[in-house]
Image (cartoon, rainbow, N blue to C red):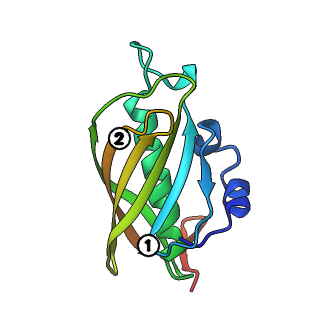
Amino acid sequence: MRLNSNDIQERIKNTLMDLLDIRFVESDDELSLEATMPVKQEYTQTMGVLHGGATISLAESLAGAGSNVLCSVDERSFGMQISASHISSAQVGDIVRAKGVIVHKGRSTHVWDVDVVSEITGRLISKIRITNAIVKKVLYIKNKVVDES
């Protein structure tokens, strides 16, 4: 999906995506989007492998960015539902790569399939489906709702 990774990296400063060191990958592919995340000790669960919640955060961040790229100027997306199957694990020192493909682009919902793969082993770590709600942008000013469009 065509995006400016420098612009996205600037927009995600001081967010969970920044904290998880998620990096978006520029591509000319119009139907997919990719991002990477290092596997650090702080992102592991008690058994020393990548925490499923960190993996899901990577996938939801990717699908959210993709939906926002696809939204018109008077719309924005919000995560609505996630289903994740964790297939194998990633170790500290690895980098995981998420590739998201939009499988449904409706007026009110987008559905993404995201595969998270280990860059070291090439194994599938998680398979995640994300549904995003697409809503009209509104501006909230002191208890008043103002339509931005």
Compare residues 107 and 59 and report the one nearer the observer.
Answer: 59
Q: Is residue 10 visible?
A: yes
Q: Identify the element where label 1 is drawn.
A: loop
Q: Where does label 1 land, which residue?
A: 31
Residue pictured at 39% horizontal, 13% vertical: 47
Compare residues 71 and 49 and report the one nearer the observer.
Answer: 49
Where residue 41 sits: x, y (%)?
Answer: 56, 19
Compared across the picture, whether 130 is left or right of 146 comes to left
- Spatial CA span between label 2 and label 1: 20 Å
Residue pictured at 43% horizontal, 28% vertical: 90
Residue 102 circle label: none
For the residues labelled 2 and 1, say whether their Cβ atoms are less than 8 Å apart: no
Residue pictured at 50% horizontal, 52% vertical: 61
Q: Identify the element where label 2 is drawn.
A: strand
Please tell me whether residue 45 is drawn above or below residue 126 in the rendered image. Answer: above
Query: What residue occupies the far top of the structure in this picture?
Result: 47
Compare residues 135 and 99 and report the one nearer the observer.
Answer: 99
Where residue 51 sits: x, y (%)?
Answer: 42, 27
Q: Where does label 2 land, which residue?
A: 124
Mark 2 or mark 1: name the one nearer the start of the chain.
1
Name the kind of residue labelled 1 in the image: Leu
Please tell me whether residue 106 is drawn above or below residue 99 in the rendered image. Answer: below
Where residue 21 sits: x, y (%)?
Answer: 63, 39
Name the kind of residue labelled 2 in the image: Leu
